[in-house]
Amino acid sequence: MKAQYDFKSGRRGAVLRSPVGKTRITIRIDDDVLQWFRAQVHKAGGGSYQTLINDALRRFSESAEQDLEGTLRRVLREEFPRYKARPKAGATRR
């Protein structure tokens, strides 16, 4: 090992920058859940368990949004007739 190293042009921080649209975080996941995701990647012949977790979270959030929209639409359909709500004159329907 050299007696002295030159770090004048060195920078602090992550060695690799995160791609645009990605944020590096630290989370705690139960061991069994993490092992399940790793096993799924292994069964598929390789890949990234982190990408698999991200995809699962994305599918869940999208389905939750669709469920919320469906619930709101159902409630509005049920409640509008009760209050005899009518569209305003001249309002266009989308």
Image (spheres, rainbow, N blue to C red):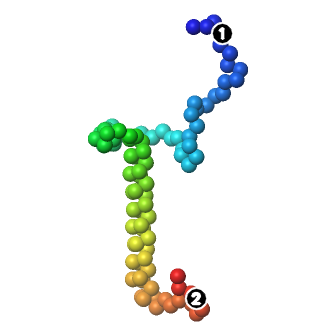
Query: Would you say 93 lies left or right of 61 here?
Result: right
Is residue 49 placed above or below 72 in the rendered structure?
above
Label 2 crowd (10 A; few <14 / some 14-19 / many >=20) = few
Closer mark to the observer between disc 1 and disc 2:
1
Is residue 67 placed above or below 75 in the rendered structure?
above
Local SS, label 1:
loop
- For the residues bearing labels 1 and 2, Cβ distance under 8 angstroms: no
Q: Nearer the viewer, residue 78 or 56?
A: 56
**Rendered image: mark on residue 49:** none
Residue 59 percent location from the top left of the image? 40, 56
User: If the image is split into quadrants, where does the N terminus sit?
Assistant: top right
Q: Nearer the viewer, residue 2 or 76?
A: 2
Residue 65 percent location from the top left of the image? 44, 64
Label 1 crowd (10 A; few <14 / some 14-19 / many >=20) = few
**Rendered image: mark on residue 4:** 1
Counting labels gives 2
Q: Which residue is mark 2?
A: 91
Residue 80 percent location from the top left of the image? 45, 85
Amino acid at dot 2: Ala
Q: Would residue 25 be seen by someone viewing this image from the given angle?
A: yes
Of the two numbered discs 1 and 2 on the same chain, state the one appearing first in sequence. Answer: 1
